[in-house]
Image: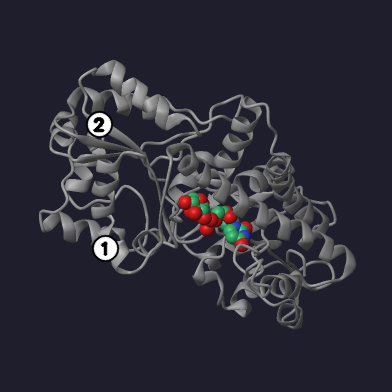
Amino acid sequence: MDLDQGKIDGLNNGKIPIYEPGLDQLVIRNHQAGRLHFTTDTAAAVKQSDVVFIAVGTPERRGDGAADLSYVFDAAKTVARNMDGFTVVVTKSTVPVGTGARVAEIIRQENPDADFAMASNPEFLREGSAIEDFMRPDRVVIGCENEKARAILKELYRPLYLIETPILFTNIPTAELTKYAANAFLATKIMFINQIANLCEAVGADVHHVSKGMGLDRRIGGKFLHPGPGYGGSCFPKDTAALASTAREHGESISIVENVIEANRWQKQRMTTKVRTALDNQVRGVTIGVLGLTFKPNTDDMRDSAALTILPALIADGATVRAYDPEGMEEAKEKMPDLVYCQDAYEACQGVDVVIILTEWNQFRNLDLKRIQAGMKARPDGRYLFCDFRNIYEPPTMVAAGFHYVGVGR
Ligand code: UDX
């Protein structure tokens, strides 16, 4: 159920409002089979349900970085007014510790006779691999202390029990905090390797080998140790800010996370500096070809993408930017109207002084480099400038092919 009639009409006609690989087939199949319905009729949707998931947005509030919970509370009121019989109300949205208790209070105020139990069931899926992550999660965390509700949720997650997914039952604040702690830790891991990458550049080390050497230690693990232009997306930026804000509210400080937030801001700016330096600080009049705009591949999501920091800064320096992204250009056009949007990678690199890779879409991993070069303007030394901020090419290969290659930490 959604309040947005346009979204619901679209879904009823098989139109998915976001790009997520495989989601269209999954939705259409279940919709056609009558297992999945879309409606704006909240009353009917809530009345018929044993479990209601609140999965609305919790954007970052301007000013203090706390999560804006107004959509969650509005949804809670609607649920309270319409529930019929015992109902489990689950917060699926990422909500700060204490929200479950506040939602329960709102429901009781709105409907003193409501027969319900609260649960917190944070979602750990990633954009771009959402279906696989949801169907085969590393674990499921459920914060719920009501026996009857636990039994219902256990039944709901039975398919995951069958594939032996660990399902962790906790109290509500624990589940709420686990989500933030996990995301903040992953963001920390990324920023740690980004800062090591920066040091690698200074001392002549290769961050890929450092990352591999670290990651093979099973206590560390190799995932989320890939350097880049800084993290973006709908989760890490706002969840780290919200966690730091929760800590401050409680008179605590998670200074590591505060530092990660600052380091991420700095990492994005550092990429701009790398481009400027590679252009001998003469950006005015230069044309830049950009491959990839979204915060990661396989999504059309531009939220907090590094492109939004790097490209406006280079345009302010006097550069012209030509860009191509397989899925993100519609959203990018709204946020950065002064880019020249192109039909493919080769068109974006036509007549440019430098190519920058910002998102590691698979189609950029195997470019026809001769063709890219043929369209480019050479630097004064006869080489072609290539900034690969996702490290998808090997430096020696690129140098041998006539490029001046700028990666991250290599
Ligand atoms: C993240 C969490 O992974 C997921 O568990 C949570 O539910 C939502 O937030 P998501 O934002 O979809 O998922 O993408 P993720 O793959 O985690 O990437 C986030 C950002 O970190 C991207 O900008 C990505 O490019 C960057 N990243 C990730 C790196 O720079 N290096 C890495 O090694 C991994």
Quarter holding residue 227: bottom right
Instruction: From the top left corner, tell me how far across and down residue 260 is, in percent.
Output: 70, 46
Farthest-out residue, right: 203
The residue type indicated by label 1 comes to Pro
What residue sits right under mark 1 in the picture? 159
Q: Is residue 77 left or right of residue 331?
A: left
> Could you tell me which residue is drawn at 60 percent across and 41 percent down?
240
> Could you tell me which residue is drawn at 80 percent across and 73 percent down?
382
Which badge, 1 or 2, is on the more N-terminal residue?
A: 2
What residue sits right under mark 2 in the picture? 116
Of 307 and 346, nearer the camera is: 307
- Could you classify mark 1 by the number of other residues whose Cα lies within 10 Å: few (under 14), some (14-19), or many (20 or more)? few
Q: Is residue 95 left or right of residue 389?
A: left
Q: Is residue 14 left or right of residue 168?
A: left
The residue type indicated by label 2 comes to Phe
Query: Under tag 1, what secondary structure?
Result: helix
From mark 1 to mark 2, how far is it between C-alphas? 24 Å
Q: Nearer the viewer, mark 1 or mark 2?
A: 2
Query: Under tag 2, what secondary structure?
Result: strand
- Could you classify mark 2 by the number of other residues whose Cα lies within 10 Å: few (under 14), some (14-19), or many (20 or more)? many
Quarter holding residue 214: bottom right
* Quadrant hosting ligand 1: bottom right
